[in-house]
Amino acid sequence: MAFPQPVFQAALRGLETWWDIVLLVLFPFLVISQLFWGLGLVHFLGVMLEPLMRPLFKVPGSGSVVMAMGYSTGAPVSALLTAQLRQKGMLTRVEGERLMSFTSNASPLFMMGAVAVGMLQQPHLGPLLAGAHYGANLLVGLLMRFFTVRRRHPLPLPPFP
């Protein structure tokens, strides 16, 4: 309330950034992911990549689409796709948690553009930062395959909204 003009300018800048960067980066991938569903590519890739995804990460093959989209676009799209797989009964709760543990990450554009160039002003660090980030996420995915829930009395799954 003491400085309304700078606050208003900062809010405008934030909205411009969202419009120019976030929306333009995420929107095409959201459309592509919905096209994958509509064309049946999620099911096709799920069947084809089941022999790879199940032993490596203990998730169904359809998780490969979430993995590809998550590693190319970042967290919001991978979360949306995981929720859709869960709603359609293609993932259990534990598989969804496992999938989100290693696909919810920053996009390459963010890592190389915003962090390396924008924050650090060292573009040559972009590939190193991205490699460390995605390598760590893959390691989490490999380690999370050992994660299981053990209960003496299994609880029923709550209805998914």
Image (cartoon, rainbow, N blue to C red):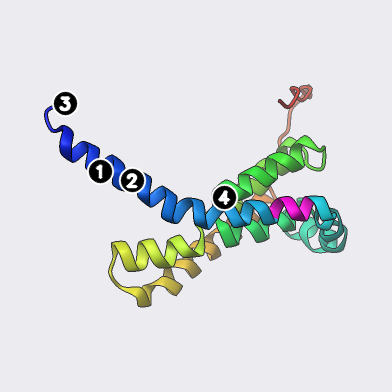
Of the numbered discs 3 and 1, the one sitting upstream in the chain is 3
Q: Is residue 147 visible?
A: no
State the separation of the CA atoms marked 3 and 4: 37 Å
Q: Is residue 97 magenta?
A: no
Left or right? Give the position of 64 relative to 71: right
Residue numbers of the magenta segment:
33-37
> Which amino acid type is shown beneath numbered disc 4?
Ser
Residue that numbered label 3 is attached to? 1
Q: Image point 73% across, 43% down: which residue?
A: 95
Q: Are circles 1 and 2 on residues that touch, CB within 8 Å? A: yes
For the residues carrying marks 4 and 2, which lies nearer the camera in this image? 2
Report x, y in % for residue 158: 74, 22
Report x, y in % for residue 119: 29, 61
> Which amino acid type is shown beneath numbered disc 2?
Gly
> Which amino acid type is shown beneath numbered disc 1?
Ala
The numbered disc on residue 14 is 2
The numbered disc on residue 104 is 4
State the separation of the CA atoms marked 1 and 4: 28 Å
